Structure formats: structure tokens, C-alpha cells
């Protein structure tokens, strides 16, 4: 028979009833969710159980917000159902981010969900930058954040982040990488400034970047692989492509 996962009692009621045992109650929500999910038969429609599963994660996070396992299981299950549950997963992860402010993994998960599932590179960049600034947060997350910011159209913001990271970096190899990225970003900023000038003069955006030449720019700057510009009026994006 197809197993079912009943909705949990509202976490507000559970907190009042459990008192100091609420941490155990939070762990019980995790155990129920993990045992249930481990028994789901392959091919079953996840929408049949998505809502009670999400409610178990919410209840677990409210009852015992410092219990990290809840957030890992939530990230491993909810975002892959549909966009609605990506948003619910990020809501649960945000509870963990507040309870565990030094943990870089939780904002990384949120940023990943924005980028991979919701196709929102600028929001992804914001959370990856937060993750990079946490204790033990990998510095390369900050670099990735700047790349995603530029992909989302915030080239100026990405350039500022890169320059700040370069100023605090001592590893020579990483400094060279940052400097190369900064050079590409500065070329993109030159194009953005030319677009702004064109808009001010003509009252509209150029249909294509070559319209900027030669009146505003003598030539379009070249970009080293793997960077390339994408112009989709009114947004200029700098993409770093991966093979």
C-alpha cells in the first residue's frame, strides 16, 4: 500500500505543549520526514506528499532551529519538486540562517536554489556573497557571486566585489584570477557607459552593440574566453561560460 505522511500539529501548538522538550520534538519531525522519504517508491508523484513533507521541515525548524540535519534533508528533497517548493525550502533555510549565523552552507543552499532552480542570478549572487563572508566560507564563493551578479546585469556591483576581494587576497594565484576577471568587468563597464550615453543622446537603447561604434566607442572591446557580453535591451550581461 502507498504510505502516507500526515500533516504535523502546528509548530506553535507543539512548542507550547512540549516546553523544554521542543528540541526533541524538532528532531522527531526530522526523523518522521526522513523515514517517510526513505520509503517512497520510485516513480511516485512527489506532489502527493510534498505539502506535509514541507510542513514537517517547517515544524522541525521552528521547534529546534539549531538542528542542522533538518536543513540538509529539506535541501535534498523540496527544491526538486517544483518552484513553489523551492521557495518553501528557501524559507526553511532562512530560519536556519538566522539560528546558525556562522554557517556558510545555508546561504550557499539558498543561493544555489535561486540560481539553479529559479534562474535568478542576481539573488543567487547576493546569498553566495553572504556565504563567502562567513567564518570558513570559501573565498571562491565571492568570486562566483561577482560572476553571477554580472550575469544578472549588475556589472558594477560585481566589479566592486571583485576589487574588494583582490584587496584582501594574499595568494598570488588567486590575485591573478581576480585581476583577469576585473579586466573583463572593466571592459564590460565601458560598454555599459556607452549604452547609457547612447540612451541619453538618442532617447532609446541601441538595438545592437555595434550601434555604439564609432560615434560613442571607437570599437567594441574584446573579451577573453570564457567571458562574453550578452545585450538584451535594456540589460547588459557579462557571462562566464563553462564547458
Image (cartoon, rainbow, N blue to C red):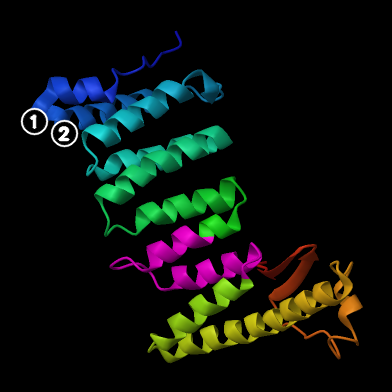
Q: Residue 106, image x and y in percent? A: 36, 52
Q: Which residue is mark 2?
A: 23
Badge 1 marks a residue whose secondary structure is: helix
Q: Nearer the viewer, residue 201 or 65?
A: 201
Residue most extreme to the top: 1
Q: Is residue 188 magenta?
A: no
| Classed neighbour count for the residue bearing mark 1: other residues with Cα under 10 Å, few (<14), some (14–19), many (≥20) | few
Camera sees residue 39: no
Q: Read off the magenta span.
A: 125-154
Left or right: 151 in relation to 63: right
Residues marked 1 and 2 touching at CB (< 8 Å): yes
Whether residue 152 appears in magenta in the rendering, the answer is: yes
Provide the major secondary structure of the magenta segment. helix
Which of these two is toward me, 75 or 229?
Answer: 229
Mark 2: few/some/many CA within 10 Å (<14, 14-19, 20+): some
What residue is drawn where x is 61% and y is 67%? 154
What residue lies at 28% left-to-right and 17% top-to-bottom? Answer: 9
In the rendered image of this protein, does residue 14 appear above or below residue 170? Answer: above
Residue 230 seen in the current view: yes
> Which of the image's four quarters has the C terminus?
bottom right
Determine the secondary structure under disc 2. Answer: helix
In this figure, which residue is indicated by the disc labeled 1?
Answer: 20
Q: How many marks?
A: 2
Q: x%, y% of residue 135?
A: 28, 67
Q: Position of residue 123 (x, y in %)?
A: 53, 56
Q: Is residue 149 above or below residue 47?
A: below
For the residues carrying marks 1 and 2, which lies nearer the camera in this image? Answer: 1
Amino acid at each position: 500500500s502507498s504510505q502516507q505522511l500526515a500533516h504535523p500539529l502546528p509548530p506553535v501548538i507543539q512548542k507550547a505543549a512540549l516546553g523544554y522538550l521542543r528540541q526533541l520534538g524538532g528532531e522527531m519531525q526530522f526523523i518522521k520526514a526522513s523515514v517517510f522519504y526513505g520509503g517512497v517508491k520510485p516513480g511516485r508523484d512527489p506532489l502527493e506528499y510534498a505539502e506535509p513533507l514541507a510542513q514537517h521541515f517547517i515544524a522541525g525548524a521552528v521547534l529546534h532551529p539549531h538542528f542542522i540535519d533538518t536543513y540538509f534533508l529539506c535541501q535534498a528533497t523540496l527544491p526538486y519538486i517544483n518552484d513553489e517548493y523551492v521557495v518553501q525550502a528557501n524559507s526553511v533555510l532562512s530560519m536556519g540562517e538566522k539560528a546558525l549565523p556562522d554557517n556558510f552552507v545555508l546561504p550557499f543552499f539558498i543561493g544555489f536554489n535561486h540560481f539553479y532552480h529559479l534562474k535568478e542570478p542576481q539573488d543567487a549572487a547576493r546569498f553566495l556573497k553572504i556565504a563567502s563572508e562567513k567564518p570558513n566560507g570559501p573565498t571562491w564563493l565571492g568570486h562566483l557571486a561577482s560572476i553571477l551578479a554580472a550575469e544578472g546585469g549588475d556589472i558594477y556591483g560585481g566589479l566592486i566585489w571583485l576589487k574588494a576581494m583582490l584587496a584582501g587576497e594574499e595568494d598570488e594565484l588567486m590575485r591573478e584570477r581576480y585581476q583577469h576577471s576585473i579586466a573583463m568587468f572593466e571592459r564590460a563597464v565601458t560598454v555599459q557607459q556607452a549604452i547609457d550615453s547612447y540612451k541619453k543622446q538618442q532617447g532609446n537603447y541601441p538595438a545592437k552593440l555595434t550601434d555604439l561604434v564609432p560615434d560613442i566607442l571607437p570599437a567594441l572591446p574584446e573579451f577573453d574566453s570564457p567571458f562574453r557580453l550578452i545585450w538584451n535591451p535594456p540589460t547588459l550581461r557579462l557571462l562566464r561560460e563553462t564547458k
